[in-house]
């Protein structure tokens, strides 16, 4: 399967490169066209290859002047936010370098997480970012970021030449406000119109505005919104065996069970009692719609094996993950309590027979628990358990841990740096044990296991629109702000870093030397950041190489 994924990965990459090549050829006539430039349309190139289209306009510049009138207020906000920008620059650079180090040390296997399409945070292209909510959030992020640059430019007396949007493959990916670069940075014949402190405020404004919007959106999401969502007890299909009657009937992982033969089962006990050897009619919710499917076949209940520990007795015995343990040495295992009770009667070195609902039996030679206390008894299998389960006709059902999921979300703001990292990775990793394929917000099958309550109840499922909008506006603003903090030109963080470093060097050496030292330092950091991003792309192809 890994080889097939790598082949698909390479195929997708080759197709993407071919499309980009064709797209670049189509843009060639616009590259040096004065006719289109006079209309505000120009082409941006990377290494001489046309890739982006810039649409410029001078309309709306008067609005920037009006918004910039409380100059003292905007200077105060920007100055107060600069320490946060520097802290974020340091944090995100260290995070990127740490990820790169571990990728070099132990290259990851190719997966959807590191596929090229998912490295870019473009809604619709990235499979973890929903198209509609993602584009709304990205639009808000771009407008807030660029307007902040424009407002601070006018506050500091820098002329704004134009503003507009940038499109790649004819899709808008960024907005921009274009300050006069000679006013902002100067040139070899004329110094900049503004001081370094003013320039840092201008360059920091976009990131600070993104952080402010992210903070407000996340405060609302993790506060009154999450507080007005209640869990609903449901069962869900967590796995479907290949070639089983359940697969032939149309069952898929992620289907939420609504009723069984007219019974609205809320627990595995109820569900198990209503199943039989004959065909059962089940109403399920999937892909935002309800459907009725038949199910028949062998019935079993026990505990589900979520994972197998590397080098464990379970791995040696060949016990696969997603199995349902139904018996140990002929003793029925109906639930976690029964499993623990039976395992407490075993000892290290004992060989036990584990039977699964899939009809297989495995001889497992138990070992001692590495972290066990001396008085603790029982052998060690080496499995991760996800809870009680019922297997029917090849479909594996479990109770949805909606309460635990909701509580984990509520706990994120109080978890410190751990919660911050969980929030950053939430769209990709989801909540462990619940949405391992990422958390897209409250959409799809998640709307069947949660419901609005309290003040939000009259809104019905439309309340989830508010939740999703706040989640994605907050997350994309946060991520865009952090990324722009990286000390690499042409990102905002690169220019901010350059001014801060040069100011430091000028305190100990002559201005000419300070400028040379600054250019060298900025070039090294830019190379380091770009190399790290490149390694992220190529590391999955080198997973056979270890250091």
Image (spheres, rainbow, N blue to C red):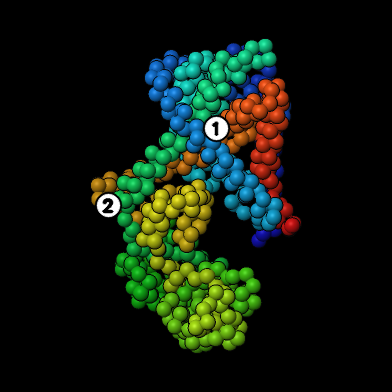
Classify the position of the C terminus by image quarter. Answer: bottom right
Q: Nearer the viewer, residue 55 or 401?
A: 401
x, y percent for residue 441: 43, 48
x, y percent for residue 98: 62, 49
Q: Is residue 167 visible?
A: no
Label 2's element? loop
Q: How crowded is mark 2: few (under 14 residues within 10 Å), some or many (20 or more)?
A: some
Q: What mark, if any, has residue 173 been given in the picture?
A: 1
* Alpha carbon separation for disc pair 1 and 2: 37 Å
Q: Residues within 10 Å of mark 1 (few under 14, many from 20)?
A: some
- Asked which quadrant contains residue 194, the reply is top right
Q: Residue at x 52, y 14 (%)?
A: 159
Label 1's element? strand
Classify the position of the N terminus by image quarter. Answer: bottom right
Q: Residue at x 65, y 53 (%)?
A: 102
Q: Do the residues labelled 1 and 2 touch (CB within 8 Å)?
A: no
Give the answer, above or below, for where 156 lies relative to 124.
above
Residue occupied by mark 2 = 453
x, y percent for residue 492: 57, 30
Give the answer, above or below, for where 356 lies relative to 396.
below
Q: Residue furthest front?
A: 508
Give the answer, above or below, for where 525 lies relative to 52.
below
């Amino acid at each position: 399967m890994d080889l097939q994924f790598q082949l698909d990965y390479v195929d997708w990459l080759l197709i993407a490169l071919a499309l980009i090549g064709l797209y670049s050829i189509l843009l060639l006539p616009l590259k040096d066209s004065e006719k289109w430039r006079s209309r505000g349309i120009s082409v941006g190139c990377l290494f001489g290859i046309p890739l982006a289209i810039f649409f410029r306009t001078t309309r709306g510049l008067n609005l920037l002047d009006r918004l910039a009138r409380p100059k003292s207020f905007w200077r105060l906000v920007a100055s107060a936010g600069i320490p946060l920008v520097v802290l974020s620059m340091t944090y995100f650079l260290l995070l990127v370098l740490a990820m790169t180090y571990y990728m070099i040390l132990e290259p990851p296997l190719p997966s959807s997480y590191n596929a090229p399409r998912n490295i870019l945070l473009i809604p619709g292209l990235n499979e973890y970012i929903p198209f509609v909510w993602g584009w709304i959030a990205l639009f808000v992020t771009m407008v807030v970021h660029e307007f902040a640059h424009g407002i601070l430019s006018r506050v500091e007396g820098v002329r704004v030449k134009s503003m507009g949007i940038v499109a790649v493959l004819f899709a808008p990916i960024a907005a921009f406000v274009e300050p006069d670069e000679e006013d902002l940075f100067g040139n070899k014949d004329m110094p900049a119109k503004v001081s370094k402190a003013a320039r840092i405020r201008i360059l920091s404004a976009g990131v600070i505005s993104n952080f402010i919007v992210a903070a407000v959106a996340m405060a609302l999401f993790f506060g009154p919104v999450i507080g007005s969502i209640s869990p609903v007890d449901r069962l869900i299909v967590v796995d479907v065996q290949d070639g089983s009657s359940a697969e032939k009937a149309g069952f898929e992982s992620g289907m939420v069970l609504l009723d069984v033969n007219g019974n609205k089962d809320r627990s595995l006990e109820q569900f198990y009692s209503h199943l039989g050897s004959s065909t059962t009619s089940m109403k399920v919710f999937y892909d935002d719609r309800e459907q009725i499917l038949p199910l028949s076949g062998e019935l079993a209940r026990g505990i589900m094996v979520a994972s197998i520990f590397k080098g464990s007795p379970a791995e040696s015995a060949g016990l696969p993950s997603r199995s349902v343990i139904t018996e140990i040495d002929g003793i029925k295992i109906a639930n976690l309590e029964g499993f623990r009770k039976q395992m407490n009667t075993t000892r290290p070195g004992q060989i036990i027979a584990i039977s699964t609902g899939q009809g297989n039996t495995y001889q497992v030679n138990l070992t001692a628990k590495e972290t066990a206390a001396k008085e603790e008894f029982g052998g060690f299998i080496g499995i991760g358990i996800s809870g009680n389960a019922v297997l029917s006709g090849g479909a594996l059902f479990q109770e949805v841990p909606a309460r635990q999921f909701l509580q984990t979300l509520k706990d994120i703001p109080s978890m410190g740096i751990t919660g911050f990292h969980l929030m950053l990775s939430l769209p990709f990793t989801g909540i462990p044990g619940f949405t391992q394929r990422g958390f897209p917000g409250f959409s799809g099958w998640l709307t069947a296991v949660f419901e609005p309550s309290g003040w939000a109840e009259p809104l019905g499922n439309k309340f989830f629109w508010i939740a999703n909008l706040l989640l994605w506006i907050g997350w994309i603003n946060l991520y865009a702000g952090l990324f722009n903090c990286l000390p690499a030109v042409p990102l905002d963080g690169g220019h901010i870093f350059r001014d801060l470093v040069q100011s430091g060097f000028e305190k100990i050496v002559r201005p000419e030397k300070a400028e040379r030292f600054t250019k060298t330092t900025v070039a090294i950091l830019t190379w380091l950041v770009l190399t790290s991003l490149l390694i992220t792309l190529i590391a999955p192809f080198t997973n056979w190489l270890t250091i």
